[in-house]
Amino acid sequence: MITRELAVTLREAGLVWHPAEGDRFQLDLPDEVELEAEAEIFTVSEMTIEARQTPSGTDLAFNGTTEWALDAVTLADAVWLPREDQLRELLRGTFRSLSRVEDTFRVEIEIADATSVFDHPDPSEAYGRALLELISRSH
């Protein structure tokens, strides 16, 4: 799983999240809310947390299963933690390979006939860094 820091950087770079069953996220709430709540990782699921369309956008509705009685948050108050397969899919046609190199994983992408390589001990983080490069170059 990618780090919260990389997930926030991807969001700030323009990665758009359309919540789906099984997606993981953390809360990104105002300072007065307990940090404990922000550290917890939640999963979108019909039974516990639903993505609901509202006139103002998408809300993540908590169905009474959380200890601290949160009803709903907006998408802006959540940080999506995409899985490895989701990151690879978002790279689309730029993805060339994932390989193991000593103690690290290497993701190779190709953008405009130029190859870029991203190494990290966690393959998800390598994919996330590659995606950040792709998003950055598309702006």
Image (tube, rainbow, N blue to C red):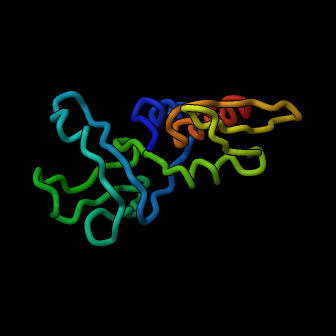
Measured as percent of width and height from the top left, residue 17 is found at 50, 50
Measured as percent of width and height from the top left, residue 93 is found at 78, 50
Q: Which residue is rendered at x = 62% and y = 40% of the image?
A: 100
Q: Which residue is rendered at x = 30% and y = 48% of the image?
A: 41
Q: Which residue is rendered at x = 81% and y = 32% of the image?
A: 115
Measured as percent of width and height from the top left, residue 124 is found at 52, 43
Task: Tell me if residue 130 comes above or below residue 98 in the rendering.
Answer: above
Q: Residue furthest bottom?
A: 47
Q: Which residue is rendered at x = 10% and y = 54% of the image?
A: 67
Instruction: Please state if 101 lies on the left or on the right of 53 as rendered.
Output: right
Q: Which residue lies furthest to the front in this view?
A: 102
In the picture, the quarter occupied by the C terminus is top right
In the picture, the quarter occupied by the N terminus is top left
Q: Residue furthest right?
A: 113
Task: Tell me if residue 36 comes above or below residue 74 in the rendering.
Answer: above
Instruction: Please state if 20 lies on the left or on the right of 62 as rendered.
Output: right
Instruction: Please state if 85 lies on the left or on the right of 63 as rendered.
Output: right
Task: Tell me if residue 139 comes above or below residue 95 in the rendering.
Answer: above
How many numbered marks have been drawn onto this rendered protein structure? Answer: 0
Q: Identify the image quadrant of residue 39.
A: top left
